[in-house]
Amino acid sequence: MGGVETGKGIDRTRFARQSNDMDNNWAADNLHVIRTLMERSALYRRALAPIMFYLGVLGIAAGALAWYAGLGKPLPFVIFWGAVGISGLAGSFLLARRQAIKDAEPFWSPPTRHVSQALLPSLVAGSIFGLLGIIAPLSAPFVALLPAVWMVLHGCALTSAGFFMRRGMQVLGWVFLLLGCGLLGVGVWVKGGMELLAGNAHLLMGGTFGALHLACGIYLLSSKDNGEAL
């Protein structure tokens, strides 16, 4: 009996050591990713500038086009901005890949995976809300709130990814988040707020997703890359 208990004790000790080794390896990998992100902050800042500029121009142009074309119905609104979102993601992917090739850096590196994982939940949630806007029986009130919901989710995505980048991404994320919450408050509590949001949905999308990204891109392109820059 004593030998059996001793064997079990040895197994438990070995298992504990293996668990500690796994925890240490996990911590070391994460520390390496964080250190790499900090060391390459200047590179990522340069890569973000054209992406932000592209998203800004795309958002403003799309908002102006949709407003001029009078796409006021819920279904065209969701389909149009869904296509704009896909274009934004595709263009950002191509710009990031071109920058990686230019700097002889691997595109799908561990830091890139961490940033992508931080963005993914909010992007998936935004896509699901867009699909709900298409199939919801009472789609008009729901779609009127979609720009605000998308702003909140986009803000959450940027603040999450901002933990791996310069603090400017978190600042931009908080701007989106607070704007979205403010617009939700207008739609829910202000008399006639829902109609106000629905009538200006395209302008809200272009003026936030477009103008804010463009302002961020201009700042990144024009400011010096030093320790004090966001």
Image (spheres, grey):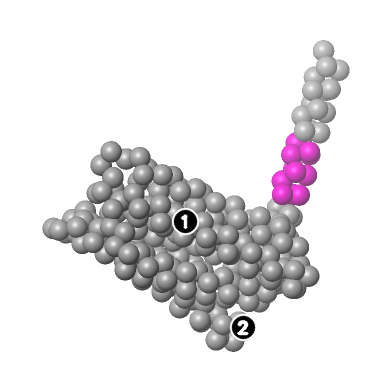
> Residue 115 or 80: which is nearer the viewer?
80
Residue 160 visible, this orientation: no
Amino acid, disc 1 = Ala
> Residue 54 or 11: which is nearer the viewer?
54
Query: Label 1 vs label 2: CA separation?
Result: 34 Å
Indicate whether residue 20 is drawn in magenta: yes
At a point 47% along the width and 56% down the height, the residue shown is 83
Which residue range is magenta in the image?
16-26
Mark number displayed over residue 225: 2
At a point 13% along the width and 58% down the height, the residue shown is 191
Indicate whether residue 85 is drawn in magenta: no
Amino acid, disc 2 = Asp
Q: Residue furthest top?
A: 1
At a point 72% along the width and 49% down the height, the residue shown is 26
On screen, residue 150 versus residue 201, left or right, reads right
**Residue 29, horizontal then vertical, whole percent:** 73, 54
On screen, residue 177 versus residue 96, left or right, reads left
On screen, residue 18 versus residue 220, left or right, reads right
Q: Quadrant of residue 1?
A: top right
At a point 29% along the width and 62% down the height, the residue shown is 70
Front position among marks 1 and 2: 1
Q: Residue furthest front?
A: 69
Q: Pointer 1: what residue?
A: 83
Between discs 1 and 2, the one toward the N terminus? 1
**Residue 108, horizontal then vertical, whole percent:** 71, 57
Dot 1 falls on a residue whose secondary structure is helix
Prevailing secondary structure of the magenta residues = helix
**Residue 107, horizontal then vertical, whole percent:** 72, 62
Q: Quadrant of residue 155?
A: bottom left
